[in-house]
Amino acid sequence: MTEPINLLAILRIKPEYIDDFLPKMMNNANGARKMEGNLRFDVYRDPKEPNTFVLIEEYIDNAAFEAQQKSEHAQPCISMFPVWIASPPEVRFLKAENINKK
């Protein structure tokens, strides 16, 4: 059985690029949610730091994650990250733990 991919990314966007970033990121998220193998793609904005966004993504396996990274809706974001990002993103691949397991 393959392991699901769980990704948490914290992005700090330069304030002058938020109006460009946000619609492209939401298009990316909406496109990802329609892809086979995607279980979740949520975009959150920190109300105390409005240029900080948190992405939570979940895929059934690495192949689904890689397909998302190569998709037409992801490319506008990926290509613009070097311009948009104010500091290196914090990206974590997480392993789900089942706390209800005995």
Image (tube, rainbow, N blue to C red):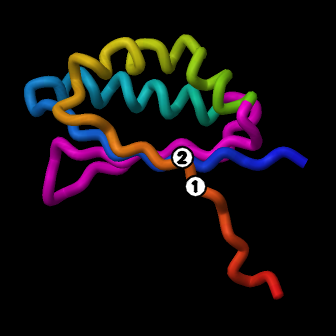
* Rendered location of residue 57, percent (x, y): 55, 44
In the image, 23: left or right of 2?
left
Closer to us: 39 or 7: 7
Q: Earlier in the sequence, mark 1 or mark 2?
A: 2
| Real-space CA distance between mark 1 and mark 2, rounded to the nearest whole angstrom | 6 Å
Which residue does the image show at 30% across and 45% down from the upper left? Answer: 53
The residue singled out by tag 1 in the image is 94
Q: Is residue 14 above or below residue 24?
A: below
Which residue does the image show at 68% across and 41% down from the upper left? Answer: 59
**Residue 37 found in image quarter:** top right
In the image, 68: left or right of 43?
right
Q: Which residues are magenta?
A: 35-62
Q: How crowded is the residue under tag 1: few (<14 C-alpha within 10 Å), some, or many (20+)?
A: few
Verify CB contact (< 8 Å) between mark 1 and mark 2: yes
Residue type, label 1:
Leu
* Rendered location of residue 36, percent (x, y): 75, 31
Residue type, label 2:
Leu
In the image, 14: left or right of 27?
left
Residue 44 within the magenta-colored segment of the rendering: yes
The residue singled out by tag 2 in the image is 7
